[in-house]
Image (cartoon, coloured by chain):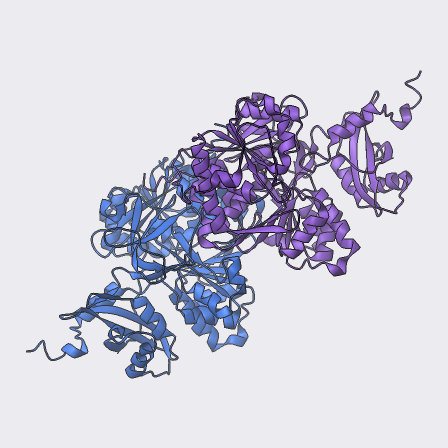
Chain colours: A purple, B blue
């Protein structure tokens, strides 16, 4: 070998931020304000945590569960586990106890680090997690007096106190497991995606490219996407490497508190699902003169596609660029990204055309391969019209599920994503829908996402959710649920007429239902599974079928 | 394995630019103007070249020599060899025939692709390169009538014509050889550095990071550093991946032509050695009102340290940021980089302090380890004062020389760089000198680079070169050679007095010699080996020894 065979281990990059920017801050929201600590302190505490975990019997490859919000101690757990070769298993604090019990047992978590406020949710599982030997409790303001009958509990600070502040990160195989994240499908048990050192190392480098999320050490990043969701989109890793300021919202996920953090900490870049940016937009509009958002330059948006009207509002009102990303737990998660201008030829197109780009899922990241396929898995043309199953492959794409391979989700080395979309002649991916959210009507597909984006652009509509409802003749027909803005009225005729300006007659929703809110998944996306189940439970009938079922 | 084991092959990233920006341009300077071709054409031609090379018997692992300037066909050779798994051996067209004969034979080049204008230099070697079966001649304007008695010659266009425009890049081991570049040391034969797919893939991703060279698809890049020097600093690879516009100067390396290309092609970023930027500065100052340099934003500088006065001139006069990089053939080559602002805490320091950063070699790139060591190879403190040998390791650092391991250049997995320097408390590397260029006087070290930077800041001095001259008592003493700006006069007393404002008495040059030019190496650095040899050949004597030797 002519070049050094340094393994691609996270340990080689995650101490870097503390080395080059030791005094930079990690800010965590608390009940009454914020806690601050430096990168140097965070690094030292992470090394202490690694020693403490080793002392508790955690070895290379053992799973360490975290049941935590975004905060400095969760970041330390990322840092410590990655460094020492333990497997960081981020548990979604919003999952059902049934799913959590399954996941903890399936992963065989040896210890769990939990935020004190989440203990009640964990205590429910007390007798259903035999692998867990010990629970380490991260105490925050307001929860100092926690008590629990979970196994062998200890306060986080007591756990790491008096441990040495340097741990010699071991040199392990670069394909060793780094983290575990379970994804809940529509059917069956949750499936575990196991990230490896090599895959996440490459993902981190790709995320920090200028033409990617353009993360920089000069940024102040507010990662709103939970760190238990697809490694917090990779932001904790990138930030540790770069040494940029990090602001962490902990359990305070309401738009008002987030907006306050953005203003008071001078956030330059934030990342979260579109519903968050909808909420913040509403708050800003209520008092635009009181809020200084001049530091903010980029909002990274993922999980679902942001409505073009929202993208445009942020740019026109605040000069803030929305960056759309597409990916999933199985893709580490960044796969495609869309920015206003991503190549030279776009410098000279109109601003309107530039914003059309951001409404697309975007350009594939370097190093990955992606294509659209028909049902026989033949490649389809990139004409911006033909819709097909999206398959993807590359060094940070899942090849099987943890201890549950599910070969039907993979095809000749490709991941079958379950999303459908098209690719335009400029090689931009456009997501039509999750394949399970598409409306299949009379043998044709209707994109629920397209209808939603169109409806939400209508003045007076705060949110729109389109779902399929069974129909005896057409198979399925679209139904729109809308949330009105406070004090506004929009008739269903107006909604349908508005859709008629952009969609064919057979694509228009059969019905418009007014609701107070749309149920969200634990990751903040609209939960269409719940919406469909609710309609069924209510005995909802499509307008043209009403009265027939009695017959 | 839970993640896909996609090997890190250049083939997975180098077709990307042509896919996302098929109409973007590759511009090559010619005798009377420029040649333009698109990325799509370049990609297709590269695939054709791969087919033609395969037809000529080139297999995976075979060495393909290039004897070429920076131009579209050289880029196609990069692309084709990397894709097909051949080893691109970039031959330095400025080397002596002795070195070239050694290198071609040592590498066992199977074919050589040569620019037609370079044929005379190659013909000298005709009987000394038995491994070479065929020479492919890239014809440019003015050389259409070339003739040669080199083996089995063919015109490049004829060679690739009628070949298919798609080659299925083979999947090979990621540690396979990608390229070869020989470095000429002070003693002995040139040594070959063999780049691998994995090492260059990682280097490419690192180069495109925001906090690195921040390369983007929206850039127009003029790579002045020759593509036969350390893979053109990696720029050809990054540009192929990103799809940015590339401007290639071919053999027209005079500052006037380069400046013309920068203006006429709207170059945003260029890369070359400091002497180039000195020359362009001089030309600009002669007619500042006629030159539109408004597109230019960054100049990347490497090879040797740019004088702080030059860095400041570009910023104050043109708003152009100089980015200093440090590395060598053995480091692929990027190792450290320095920009005006590289972390948040630097946003609030004064502009003067920001520019002090750029005068340093800079921050270590993510993924690498670097430290300074004493003669027993113990680590030294990062206090900004202690000077030591610089050692480096990481996934794109050489671990041995090609078929000539030289274990004495390595130490426990580290490369002993041959440079000496210090590291300041902000973790910035500051290069004191090449260890062979340091002046060792009375047991202490004097940095020739520091003296040169100080002297060149003096009004009227165009260039300064400080070398060691043997002294019977002090071992060595510094001598300064200076080139005056046209029409200016600066006395040697002024130079010495000026040095006295920043250096101790024993560090001042013993003599100031006025010369018309400083000899340069083939890569554009001042060639101190030649300067020292010339002084010896002239029988030069230090002032305090004059007249003694006759005694």
B100 or B308, which is in the foreground? B308
Q: Residue at x 40, y 41 (%)?
A: A167
Residue A327 found in image quarter: top right
The quadrant of the image that shows the C terminus of chain A is top right
Determine the residue located farthest toward the top in the rendered image: A551
Q: Residue at x 56, y 52 (%)?
A: A36
Residue A28 rendering spot, x and y as whole percentages: 60, 48
Q: Is residue B156 visible?
A: yes
Relative to residue A496, is residue B276 depicted above or below?
below
Residue A23 rendering spot, x and y as whole percentages: 49, 55
Determine the residue located farthest toward the left in the rendered image: B551
The quadrant of the image that shows the N terminus of chain A is top left
A62 or B102, which is in the foreground? A62
Residue B514 rendering spot, x and y as whole percentages: 28, 78
Query: B90 left or right of A244?
Result: left
Relative to residue A33, is residue B497 depicted above or below?
below
Residue A431 found in image quarter: top right
Q: Is residue A296 visible?
A: no
Task: Give the number of marks.
Answer: 0
Residue A481 found in image quarter: top right
Query: B179 left or right of A242?
Result: left
A231 or A387, which is in the foreground? A231
Q: Residue at x 23, y 66 (%)?
A: B444
Relative to residue B221, is residue A254 depicted above or below?
above
Residue B234 rendering spot, x and y as whole percentages: 43, 50
């Amino acid at each position: 070998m002519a070049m050094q065979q340094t393994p691609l281990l996270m340990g080689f990059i995650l101490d870097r931020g503390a080395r080059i920017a030791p005094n930079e801050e990690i800010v965590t929201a608390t009940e009454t304000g914020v806690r601050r600590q430096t990168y140097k302190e965070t690094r030292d505490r992470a090394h202490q945590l690694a020693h403490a975990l080793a002392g508790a019997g955690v070895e290379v490859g053992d799973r360490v569960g975290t049941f935590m919000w975004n905060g400095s101690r969760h970041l330390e757990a990322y840092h410590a586990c990655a460094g020492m070769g333990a497997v960081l298993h981020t548990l979604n604090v919003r999952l059902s106890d049934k799913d959590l019990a399954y996941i903890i047992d399936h992963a065989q978590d040896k210890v769990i680090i939990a935020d004190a406020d989440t203990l009640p949710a964990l205590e429910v599982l007390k007798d259903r997690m035999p692998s867990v030997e010990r629970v380490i409790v991260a105490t925050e303001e307001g929860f100092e007096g926690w008590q629990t009958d979970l196994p062998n509990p200890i306060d986080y600070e007591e756990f790491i106190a008096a441990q040495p502040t340097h741990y010699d990160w071991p040199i392990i195989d670069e394909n060793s497991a780094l983290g575990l994240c379970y994804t809940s499908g529509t059917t069956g048990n949750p499936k575990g995606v196991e990230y490896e050192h090599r895959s996440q190392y490459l993902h981190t480098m790709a995320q920090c490219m200028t033409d990617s999320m353009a993360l920089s050490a000069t940024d102040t990043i507010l990662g709103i996407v939970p760190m238990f969701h697809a490694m917090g989109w990779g932001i904790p890793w990138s930030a540790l490497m770069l040494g940029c300021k990090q602001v962490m919202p902990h359990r305070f996920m309401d738009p008002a508190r987030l907006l306050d953090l953005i203003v008071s900490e001078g956030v330059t870049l934030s990342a979260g699902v579109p519903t968050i940016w909808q909420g913040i937009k509403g708050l800003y509009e209520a008092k635009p003169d009181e809020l200084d958002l001049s530091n903010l330059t980029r909002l990274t948006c993922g999980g679902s596609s942001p409505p073009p009207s929202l993208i445009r509002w942020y740019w026109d009102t605040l000069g803030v660029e929305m960056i759309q990303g597409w990916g999933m737990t199985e893709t580490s998660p960044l796969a495609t990204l869309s920015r206003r201008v991503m190549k030279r030829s776009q410098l000279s197109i109109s601003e309107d055309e530039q914003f059309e780009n951001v409404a697309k899922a975007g350009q594939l990241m370097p190093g990955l391969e992606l294509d659209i396929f028909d049902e026989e898995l033949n490649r389809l043309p990139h004409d911006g019209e033909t819709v097909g199953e999206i398959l993807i492959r590359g060094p940070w794409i899942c090849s099987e599920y943890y201890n549950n391979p599910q070969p039907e989700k993979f095809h000749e080395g490709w991941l079958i994503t379950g999303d459908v979309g098209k690719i335009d002649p400029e090689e931009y991916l456009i997501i039509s829908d999750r394949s399970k959210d598409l409306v299949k009507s009379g043998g044709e597909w209707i994109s629920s996402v397209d209808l939603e984006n169109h409806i939400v652009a209508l003045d007076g509509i705060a949110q729109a959710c389109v779902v399929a409802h069974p129909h005896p003749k057409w198979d399925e027909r679209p139904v729109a649920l809308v949330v009105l803005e406070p004090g506004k009225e929009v008739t269903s005729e107006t909604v349908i007429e508005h859709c008629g300006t952009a969609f064919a007659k057979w694509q228009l929703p059969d019905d418009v239902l007014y609701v107070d809110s749309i149920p969200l998944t634990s990751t903040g996306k609209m939960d269409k599974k719940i919406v469909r189940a609710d309609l069924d439970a209510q005995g909802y009938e499509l307008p043209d079928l009403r009265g027939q079922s009695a017959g």
